[in-house]
Image (cartoon, rainbow, N blue to C red):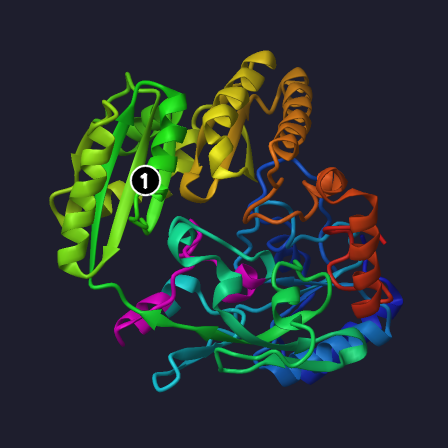
Amino acid sequence: MAISSKTERVLETLRKEFNGRVKIDVVERVLYEKDATAIPIETKTPQAVIFPTNKSEVQKIVEILYNEDIPMVPRGGGSCLTGGAVSLRGDEVIISFEKMNRFKIDLDNATVIAQPGVITYQLQQAVEKQGLFYPPDPSSYKYSTIGGNIAENAGGPRCVKYGVTRDYVLGLEGVIKYGEHFKFGAPVMKDVAGYDFTKFLIGSEGTLGIITEAILRLIPLPKERKVLLAFFDSLEDVGKAVTKIMTSGIFPSALEFMDRACIKAVNDYKNLGLPENKVGLLLIEVDGHPIAVQEEVMEVAKLLESMGVSVKLAKTKEEEEKLWAARRALGPAISKLGTGKVNEDIVVPRSKLAEYIPAVERLAKKYNLVCAIFGHIGDGNLHVNFMFDRSNRDDLERVEKAVEELFKLTVNFGGSITGEHGVGITKKPFLKLQLGEVGIELVKGVKKLFDPKNLFNPGKLVDV
């Protein structure tokens, strides 16, 4: 879409104000047209990309754009998998937080104040040097940002024990309609003053306003970690093993699943030599005090062996890192199974896993699709991947039908259509399956309260 005369005038004002940090050259704008979404979606080149460096600049940008009726899309690392950080209409301005990447650790209060552009991994590395721990660890943690994690309520393998991003955000600052500034929460563990808008904004996908600063809670860094693998001949036994572990009195820091297709893909990608005759494996991590960890990991091994499950303990830190590197490389590894991949991050109650996983495999067979399942099985959050040929229209149609049926199956099992990727564009048509008519109307009402002009990330999550 060509830049309109009104937008051109507004952008010229912003260019003078922000000294070259407003990019309107088409080559630079095209770089921000896509995010990491694998499903083919129609996006448009944004009108401009703006790079603020502090919260005052963000407030000024929002004030000008909102008063001039120009829509805006906040963007962190561009790692969103549901189309949340892209321009859909072509009249939007991208607000990129690449230059807002500073943070300050408060050791006395075990908190950190972070700008939205802070890379998750860099913050984790810094706090761990101080003996502290920021647990949320999405697979994109080496390039995703704190702001993006907050917008999507990101999870990761460690969430089974430590919780998701929401559990570590104590306060937020940001900007809503007409450039109005908000500040919710404080660097304290207890705060019941009014409605909890801090938690409410987490997972709102940039549709209610723009976050400029977050207060994050830190906890003590575990002194030891141990990893073991368990190999299964039956998918039903996987679900039963998860239940046994989670009711054994041991709380693993990670409990990850890979099916047979994933095992083969990782072997081809990382040459790990994992047994490919098994239907699946569990990667189990236990952390805490060194003595307790040693006892607990052996107890988990005995529990699994009593079920007839073969177990392998990682003997060195290098072996552990190799296994985790393989788990985090699953996305690109299974991408080699087809020219197209749809990755859905559904969640079901743990008690239903033994029934649910075989049901998904039957669904894949019904539509003649290659299916790879992996994920955070300890909290019921699975990544169901359907592989297809992008050039084959029939393949794409079968995938679309399979995804719709997958969501219906998930809701019928008492689960959620998304555990950490968010709704964005790709899951928006299915949100009503889970929330119902009343739920959708409430979401729309909140959106209109925060953003009456529908200018914050329009077209995402819900239509108003």
Looking at the picture, does residue 180 appear above or below residue 430?
below
The answer to whether 434 is drawn above or below residue 275 in the figure is below
Query: Which quadrant of the figure has residue 348?
Result: top right
Q: What residue type is labelled 1?
A: Ile
Residue at x 74% of width, y 74% of height: 176
In the rendered view, tell whether residue 371 sits above or below residue 187.
above
- Residue range in magenta is 124-150
Q: Where is residue 165 in the image (x, y as percent from the top left)?
A: 50, 61
Residue matched to label 1: 245
Q: In which quarter of the image is residue 193?
A: bottom right
In the image, 48: left or right of 218? right
Comparing 306 with 312, the one in front is 306
Is residue 57 part of the magenta span, yes or no?
no
Residue 285 on image: x %, y %: 27, 47
Q: Nearer the viewer, residue 272 or 22?
A: 272
Residue 339 visible in this rendered orientation of the protein: no
Question: Nearest the camera: 20 or 172?
Answer: 172
Numbered disc 1: secondary structure: helix
Was residue 133 drawn as part of the magenta stretch in this picture? yes
Along the line of sight, the residue nearer the viewer: 314 or 82:
314
Figure disc tally: 1
Which x, y percent locates residue 376?
42, 42
Residue 204 image point, x, y percent: 67, 60
Quarter of the image for the C terminus: give it: bottom right
**What crowding class fits label 1: few (fewer than 14 Cα within 10 Å), some (14-19), or many (20 or more)?**
many
- Compared to residue 430, the image places residue 234 above or below, namely above
Residue, x 79% and y 63% (percent of image)?
A: 446
Would residue 232 appear left or right of 428 to someone viewing this image? left
Q: In this view, does 427 lie to the left or right of 312?
A: right
Q: Is residue 453 left or right of residue 96?
A: right
Q: Looking at the image, can residue 109 be seen?
A: yes
